[in-house]
Amino acid sequence: MAIPIPSRQLFINGDWAEPLLKKRIPIINPTTEEIIGDIPAATAEDVDVAVQAARSALTRNKGKDWAFASGAVRAKYLRAIAAKIKERKPVLAKLETVDCGKPRSESEADMDDVVGCFEYYADLAEGLDAKQKAPISLPMKTFKSYVIKEPIGVVALIVPWNYPLLMATWKVAPALAAGCAAILKPSELASVTCLELGEVCREVDLPAGVLNILPGLGPEAGASLASHPHVDKISFTGSTVTAVKIMTAAAQRVKPVTLELGGKGPIVVFEDVDIDKAVEWTIFGCFYTNGQICSATSRLIVHESIAAEFLDRLVKWSENIKISDPLEEGCKLGPIVSRGQYEKVMNFISNAKSEGATILYGGNRPKHLKKGFFVEPTIITDVTTSMQIWREEVFGPVLCVKTFTTEEEAIELANDTHYGLGGAVVSKDRERCDRVSKLLQNGAVWVNCSQPCFCQAPFGGTKWSGFGRELGEWGLESYLSVKQVTEYVSDEQWGWYQPPNQ
């Protein structure tokens, strides 16, 4: 049965607003390749209206309505949003699946995480009240000093299409908890559930202008947000190429940015592992979310003494993955998000072959699926470190493999990348895992697993994978400005200058 797609406009100043240039973008279901609806397309003109709405939300009633309201007030709205999303979970999960192609079970898990994230930041918002005016110990008794944490202002939140509502929540929840007003720009490839967040905000009576939602093309909506003079901060998740443009635009006005970018993560598997356990984490780390994970551990580095057996089991486990319409029960691999992305993934596989690598498994469209942007889980061996498949992010279900002999060699291979988002080490030797974890050049390291993510723990990268951290207390701090207030409390004259004669 077809899933009805709500027809929405832009969400600005607490209500729906038609784009000023009346542009819309078709929604293409990646499973059927059919147009199933459309979304509004914001341009620079709409960005101006949304930014003004956000600024007004911050200054309304001298800030008492939102920016300088107590954290407990903001927490009430965050919990109300969480409750509405929990209530709508079945519908939102289906919309996410038909929009971006991820298996329904994953979309359902995402909605649970969305709810948990809003609730977590509601708790942190309440905790902010107790931290205000935190005293600072000074060496001079004639002064007293304390710290105030204030919202950074109007923030632009630009998110990708692989976890549409969840990635939006990673930014929206802490930004609102901090007291900021936000403009959310979802990907034009997957905006449906982000627009439904606007309807949720309407229903819970979130103050007008606190959250505005502007789908649209990057050059028209995203670029306008990044360069807007009245946007105080940009938080971006996406490609390194786009991040460079955003940093350049932000630099013109010296505004802060948080960047969570691509990855080419390693999973280092030592010879002492339980092979089936390690194999399952390996395929989860690369094939989950249809392989479209920025932190994917898509470079398998396996000890040579177990490589043959490990790869044999890896193929058998991969053969057992159900590839189907992502709405089907038991689906574990759905389609790539769009035709353009599908063609990019297939080109990576073709280039690997032409450079001399071996396609051990997969590499094609599944034979039983004639439509949709489906790619088989793919395992590539005989890879050299100069090959494109080793060096560049694929963003699809493609795993490349190299073997190693010594721990030192494994670490060198693991760090042989411009990226530094996620990495994993698998071994029964705890001391070895500790050593390797310290030496991996990644913002997140997983031990005997890959990809677990909790809203309480920080997430972000190093090198070309960006800087700044989302989630946890670190995510909240990135939307706060710290103000020092210092008072002279002595009754005595300061006495630095000679007083004039009476």
Image: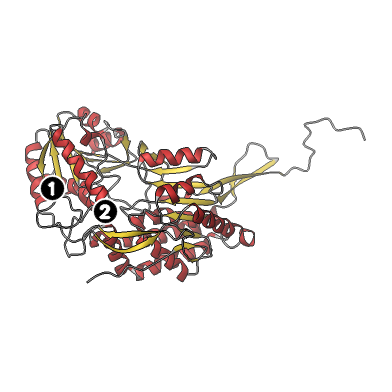
Asked which quadrant contains residue 90, the reply is bottom left
Asked which quadrant contains residue 387, the reply is top left
Query: Is 203 left or right of 274, judged from the image as shown?
Result: right
| Residue 134 can be seen, yes or no | yes
Residue type pointed to by label 1 = Asn
Circle 2 residue: 337
Query: Is 334 left or right of 202, judged from the image as shown?
Result: left
At 39% from the left and 42% from the top, the residue drawn is 242
Quadrant position of the N terminus in the picture: bottom left
Circle 1 residue: 364
Residue type pointed to by label 2 = Val
Q: Reply above or below: 430 against 201.
A: above
Q: CA distance from mark 2 to mark 1?
A: 16 Å
Q: Position of residue 187 (x, y in %)?
A: 37, 53
Q: Nearer the viewer, residue 502 or 88?
A: 88
Query: Is 58 left or right of 354, judged from the image as shown?
Result: right
* SS class, disc 2: loop
Q: Nearer the viewer, residue 28 or 226?
A: 28
Query: Is 235 left or right of 392, judged from the image as shown?
Result: right
The answer to the question of whether label 2 and label 1 lie on touching residues, with beta carbons closer than 8 A, is no
| Residue 428 can be seen, yes or no | no
- Display coloring: secondary structure
Q: Point out the tag, 2 or 1, that comes first from the N-terminus.
A: 2
Q: Reply above or below: 447 against 411.
A: below
